[in-house]
Every structure is written in C-alpha cells, then in structure tokens.
Image: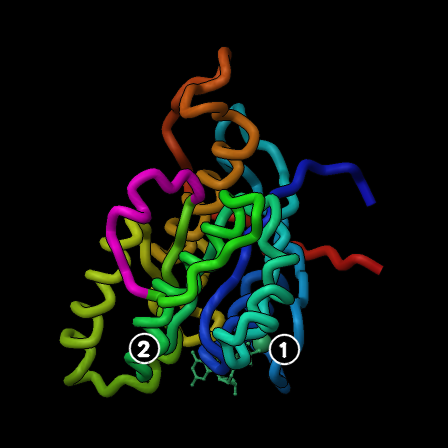
Amino acid sequence: MDSLDRVKVLVLGDSGVGKSSLVHLLCQNQVLGNPSCTVGCSVDVRIHDYREGTPEEKTYYTELWDIGGSVGSASSIKSTRAVFYNGINGIILVHDLTNKKSSQNLYRWSLEALNRDSLPTGVLVTNGDYDREQFVDNQIPLLVIGTKLDQIPENKRIEVLARTAFLAEDFNAEEINLDCTNPRYLAAGSSNAVKLSRFFDKVIEKRYFIRDGNQIPGFSERKRFGGSTFKSYHYD
Ligand SMILES: Nc1nc2c(ncn2[C@@H]2O[C@H](COP(=O)(O)OP(=O)(O)OP(=O)(O)O)[C@@H](O)[C@H]2O)c(=O)[nH]1
Ligand SMILES: [Mg+2]
C-alpha cells in the first residue's frame, strides 16, 4: 500500500437509512447486493483526487467509517460508539427521505459525534435537543445525504425536498438526495458528483491546509474542478 495521506469521515444515521449501501456505492461504484445490519463499524476507502484537474491535484485516501445505527441512546451503546469518534475530519449525515424521524435524529447523531470529539472527558449529549448555536463553531465539514429518493412519489418530491433543504441549512452543509441502488445518481460530472468532490476537498483542506482557521502559507485558492475517481482500496 502506498503511503497516501488520509482523512477520516464518519457516516452516521439511523439503522436502515442506507449508510452501508451508500458507502459501497461511494467506494466501489457498485450497488450493495445483500445489505445486512452493520454491527459496530465497517471501514471502506474511497480514493479521492483533491482539486482534480488543477496543479494542486493530489490523491488522498478517504476512509469512510460506517457506524452501525442500531438503537441508540443507551449510555453503554453510546460509549461503545464513542471509540469511533476520535480524530474525525468530516461527517456524512444520512437520512431516509421516506422517514421523518430519521431526519430529525440527524441532530442527535451529529451532536453525539461532535461533542465526543471536543470533550476529552467523553461526555455525550443525551437529550438530543437541537440548538443551532451548537453548530456555529463547528469546524468539521458536514454533508447531508437523503436516501430512497426513488421511493418518494413524483408529486410529493417538492414538499419532501423543501423540508430536507432546511435540514442542510441548519447544519450549514451541502445536501445530496439519491437512490443508493442506482449508481447513475453519482455519475461523473453530475451535480451530485461535484458536490461530493467539493465536500471531500473541504475535508482535506481543513485537515492538511488550514490550521487554527488560517490558511497555511503557500496555499492559495484556485478555481475548483469537480469529480473524483472511484478506484477503491481495501485493507487486509
Ligand atoms: N429503494 C431504496 N432502497 C435503499 C436505498 N438505500 C438503501 N436501501 C435499502 O435499505 C435497506 C437498508 O440499507 P443499509 O445500507 O443496510 O442501511 P444501514 O444504514 O447501513 O443500516 P444499519 O447497518 O443497520 O445501520 C437495504 O435493504 C437497502 O437495499 C435507496 O436509496 N433506495
Ligand atoms: Mg449498515
């Protein structure tokens, strides 16, 4: 394995929303054949070409940490999950567009992961109440992904997508809505692929090019080009 720089991105959301299906699509560019409930955590790697097409282009491993979403707030289960929350560089929040509760629970998931990272004591949020202020100082890039778009009837889509747009706004994040059983939604050059590429670029920038809110000397903003490759790598 070449020694490439890497970033750690958590994939969080309720059980059954499609996290493993999404990760498989992102890392293998294939539909996951037989999804089963993830126990603990599963890690897959997507190879991302940072600033593809520019002189700064460089390849990074983006590790996607797919956290099993099974029942959630018992403190023992939370503290088990907490071991995965160290050293996070980005978070993908996944909800099922056909399930409102899964959207609401994203506040809880994000607070759980973010507070664990910032509090060395390991104290986790328990009430799940949303407070916009809690995200104001957040330095970790977030991306909101809505799954099962295929299951929303055409005549309901505007209403459902208006609701999820607010969600992304609350998190100050980009959003992508898709069907994880159809690779076309992430086709190279599509707006979803560009958003995804921008998200991973941001994660890499925060990890490798920006310290304490300042750009590292010599790093300059340039025009971005979207797109990332779908090569994948597996640990033994
Ligand atoms: N129709 C449709 N089905 C989907 C989509 N995404 C996931 N599914 C299905 O939803 C079920 C659950 O998907 P998983 O990927 O296992 O969900 P998960 O979030 O990983 O669940 P846990 O591992 O229990 O946390 C599977 O049957 C998937 O095939 C989608 O976009 N559209
Ligand atoms: Mg899973």
Q: Secondary structure at mark 1?
A: loop
Where residue 5 appears, x then y in whole percent? 68, 36
Direction from residue 76 to residue 125 in the image, left or right: left
Colouring used for the render? rainbow
Q: Secondary structure at mark 2?
A: loop
Q: Is residue 137 visible?
A: yes
Q: Residue at x 37, y 28 (%)?
A: 223
Residue 54 badge = none
Label 2 and label 1: CA atoms lie apart by: 20 Å
Part of the protein shown in magenta:
129-140
Which badge, 2 or 1, is on the more N-terminal residue? 1
Secondary structure mainly formed by the magenta segment: loop
User: Disc 2 marks which amino acid?
Assistant: Leu
Direction from residue 15 to residue 170 in the image, left or right: left
Residue 97 badge = 2
> Can you tell which of label 2 and label 1 is closer to the viewer?
1
Q: Residue at x 64, y 66 (%)?
A: 80
Q: Residue at x 15, y 74 (%)?
A: 158
Vertical arrangement, residue 213 with respect to residue 33, above or below: above
Where residue 45 appears, x then y in whole percent? 66, 56
Where residue 145 appears, x then y in whole percent? 38, 64
On the rendered image, what quadrant is the C terminus found in? bottom right
Residue at numbered disc 1: 38
Residue 96 sits in which quadrant? bottom left
Estimate how packed mark 1 is, as few (under 14), some (14 to 19) or many (20 or more) residues with alpha carbons within 10 Å. some
User: Disc 1 marks which amino acid?
Assistant: Thr
Mark 1 residue's CB less than 8 Å from ligand 2 = yes
Vertical arrangement, residue 28 with respect to residue 89, above or below: below
Q: Residue at x 20, y 78 (%)?
A: 157
Q: Is residue 69 magenta?
A: no
Q: Is residue 29 visible?
A: no
Vertical arrangement, residue 102 with respect to residue 189, above or below: below
